[in-house]
Amino acid sequence: MPNKGPSQRQLRVGEMVRHALTAVLQRGEIPDPVIERTVISITEVQMSPDLKIATVFLSPLGSDDPQPVIKALAAHQKLIRGKLSPALRQMRYMPEFRFRPDTSFDNFARIDALLHSPEVARDLADEESEDKE
């Protein structure tokens, strides 16, 4: 049976967690120099089926290496869970957070570069000339 993807509940809770985490970061509630001096974009939060694990995909803006930010957030996981608990009080369990770099922008850039490569442009031009005939 193929994987059918996340449920509506997982998607809804993931988005709720993303909003709450973004608010905590915007208010500067995590006392860490790496986090305070970096603008962090939380692009997605994927919840496990039991909603006990939240995988947070993030992109530190203006930085090529997301690892220092990921390490700083992981080190403050307990504090983050405490700061998020009022916003997520309707959840039965406060999820454990796993922070991961968001590579989707890199994938988009790679695909865009491929689409604009001379080989693909030539193939597209060949298809257009065939369509006109």
Image (spheres, rainbow, N blue to C red):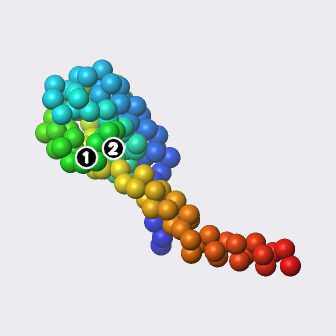
Residue at (64, 76) in percent of width and height: 123
**Number of callouts:** 2
Image quadrant occupied by the C terminus: bottom right
Q: Is residue 96 above or below residue 34?
A: below
Q: Which residue is mark 2?
A: 58
Relative to 95, 16 lies left or right: right
Tell me, yes or no, if residue 130 can be seen here: yes
Amino acid, disc 1: Pro
Amino acid, disc 2: Leu
The x, y position of residue 7, in whole percent, is: 47, 51
Give the class, few, some or many, for how many residues have Cα within 10 Å of label 1's Cα (few <14, many ≥20). Answer: some
Find numbered disc 2 in the image and state the secondary structure of the residue it sits on.
strand
The x, y position of residue 38, in whole percent, is: 26, 33
| Disc 2 + disc 1, Cβ < 8 Å | yes
Give the class, few, some or many, for how many residues have Cα within 10 Å of label 2's Cα (few <14, many ≥20). Answer: many
Q: Quadrant of residue 78?
A: top left
Tell me, yes or no, if residue 89 can be seen here: no
Q: Nearer the viewer, residue 124 or 70?
A: 124
Residue at (15, 29) in percent of width and height: 32
Nearer-N-terminus badge (2/1): 2
Q: Quadrant of residue 81?
A: top left
Residue at (46, 45) in percent of width and height: 11
Residues at marks 2 and 1, CA–CA distance in whole angstroms: 8 Å
Q: Is residue 25 above or below residue 107?
A: above
Numbered badge on residue 66: 1
Q: Nearer the viewer, mark 2 or mark 1?
A: 1
